[in-house]
Image (tube, coloured by chain):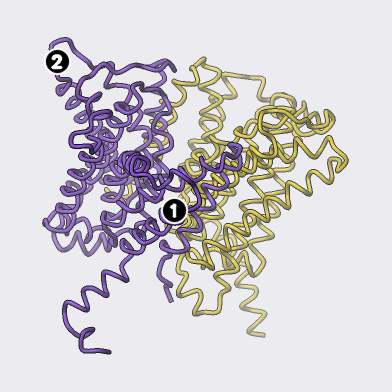
Chain colours: A yellow, B purple
Amino acid sequence: MSIIRSAKSAGALYWPVQAHRNIGVRALFLVVLAFLVAYGVLFPGLFTASGFGKFTQSWFPLALVAMAQAILMLTGGISLAIGATVSLGAVIAATTMAGPLGVAGGAAAVALAGLGIGAATGFIVVKLRLPAIVVTLAGSFIIGGAALLILPRPGGAIPAWLSDLLAGDTPAAFLILVVIVLLWKLYLATPLGLSLYAAGENPVGAYRSGVPVDAARVAAYAISGLLSTSAGLFVAAQTGSGDPVIGTAFTLNSIAAAVLGGIGFLGGQGTMRGALAGSLLLSLMISVMFFLGFTPVAQYVAQGLIIIGAVAIPQFRKVQQ
Amino acid sequence: MTAWNDSAGGKRASAILKSRPFLTLAIVAAVWIVASFVSRGFGAYGHLRYLVELGAVIGLVAAGQTFVVVAGGIDLSVAAIVTVSAISLPLLSWQADPTGLVSVIAVLALTTAIGVVNGLGVALLRVHPMIMTLAMATFLQGLLIIIAGGSAVTAENPLVHWLGNARPAGIPAGIILWIAVSTVVLTVMHATPFGARIFAMGANPLAASLSGVPMTSTTLAVYGISGFTAALAGVLVLGMNGQGYVGIGDPYLLASIAAVVLGGTSILGGLGTYAGTIPGAILLVTITALITVVNASPGWRSILFGSLILGLLLLSGREQARR
């Protein structure tokens, strides 16, 4: 009886907990909404099916890498190898999918590479107790080198139908993103997913309470790798070919998106919806600057300024309170 | 336990033997000895001197990085700052400045100011160091392309030329500069109140702040020093290269962090010494030289470099277990 009651109250607790978690990102949601409205007014094409499809396609890879970075930061880790991993995913997709393996085999190769690299990184960081920053910085050289070995210069091919399916005039990318978010919710309900926040917030306490801290952290690295190579597959489908350095910018952008979304560096702070909103905000800013005719160089300058501003203002308010 | 081991001198000797800086130094010596047997010409005096000269550049960047990391931060803008100094120096050369000293001082002041801005973001705006310095690097990169426009600029500065090419008493000027900077850095770090404050800040910021460490000014100073030494490295690399171009500083980001960590400084802050960073820098140059000897494709070279750093980290960079 008491078990049932507590289960019931646990169910009733779900929405208040979610609402509480939204508090930190409410302002961010408003800013994103304002940007979306401004974008929609500036470029009315957003509200057609193909316009919406194109917009979500430009957001999709950034959303994936933001999730990849956020899941690590939630466990108290970080990766400076996201960009290299995206590149590796892109070159694997571009070299396998048009070959004998076919699209299914190529996608499997991309997924396996991501999971394998992530798990290996996680093992080195967690089990061998090396600092994540340095491991992933060194790892970015290894992964980037592997991408150069597979495809020394831009080339390879993605079957045209796959490019049309993922990056054509349909909102397929958005639907996939919805599925990924639902899968994330499911993952949070598994024992490993439940351990994620505990492992980041207070690893020693969680360990002593019987939480599988190490397993949760290694799994987070593996999932992060999978998300990164998948983003690479999508980028390859977008461009129709592979490029061994195409992912470089994603390292900074993934950290920026996660931090904009309220994910803390110390672990256990923030939500995935915040990280997604952060990536959407970043993607909107990049699109707006592009449409307003900023040169890529001016975009660099503006991006640096905006990231500092966006990160500093909430922190500054917190200090004043 | 022997009586010799109980004596103070013996304890000190065994502490030195077990310390991280000594371990890194031992690895360097071992690699040099093995490499000079395997590869002809590696162990020649001229080649080793050249390695140390290259190591001076990494060592200078890593000097500031050591300060920042010990203070509990990280500076990911050092590569951009090296490039800033190597590009802005030729642009700042005046006719009325025959020795070139004034423009060098101007560049050092400029980059120190950039570092201080990093520190302002970290200390006052409370932006995480990684975000602050990465955003600064992005910002500088854009600015550099606007200023230099992607073409290489040639330095005609006598002081810079002397620094990159002169060999008073057979020792390259760059190495002399490195020795001088190392002396100052080690003294400041281990024999001044400022150094003690940095360690306190990195070990426990709250406790340090409550104990009266001036957090804001110390943070500003630490990032300012990092900008200063990165620019010194930029000046040296410009002198050795003769030309500055966008991207000239790029290799020094990973190198500076790796040198710090290989030298036994904890990336979490509060623990470490520049005495370990020095052999760490030489070790990195040695690795790069060995990879060049192997004569592999760029992909393999990159993989080898990353793997060797990872392998060396296993020897000397492990964090303590927390439970």
Q: Residue at position x 58%, y 36% from top?
A: B298
Q: Residue at position x 70%, y 27% from top?
A: A239
Specify whether B142 is left or right of B85.
right
| Label 1: chain letter | A
Q: Residues within 10 Å of mark 1 (few under 14, many from 20)?
A: some
Q: Viewer-proximal residue, A294 or B298?
A: B298
Disc number for residue B98: 2
Specify whether A281 is left or right of B129.
right
Q: Amino acid under label 1?
A: Gly
Image x and y of residue B59, in percent? 30, 45
Q: Quadrant of residue A47?
A: top right
Q: Viewer-proximal residue, A258 or B157?
A: B157
Please tell me whether mark 1 or mark 2 is closer to you in this view.
2
Helix or strand or loop: what does disc 1 sit on? loop
Q: Viewer-proximal residue, B152 or B72?
A: B152
Helix or strand or loop: what does disc 2 sit on? loop
Q: Residue at position x 46%, y 56% from top?
A: B34
Is A208 above or below relative to A214?
A: below
> Disc 1 designates what residue?
A264
Q: Real-space Cα distance between discs 1 and 2?
A: 51 Å
Is B14 above or below relative to B318?
A: below
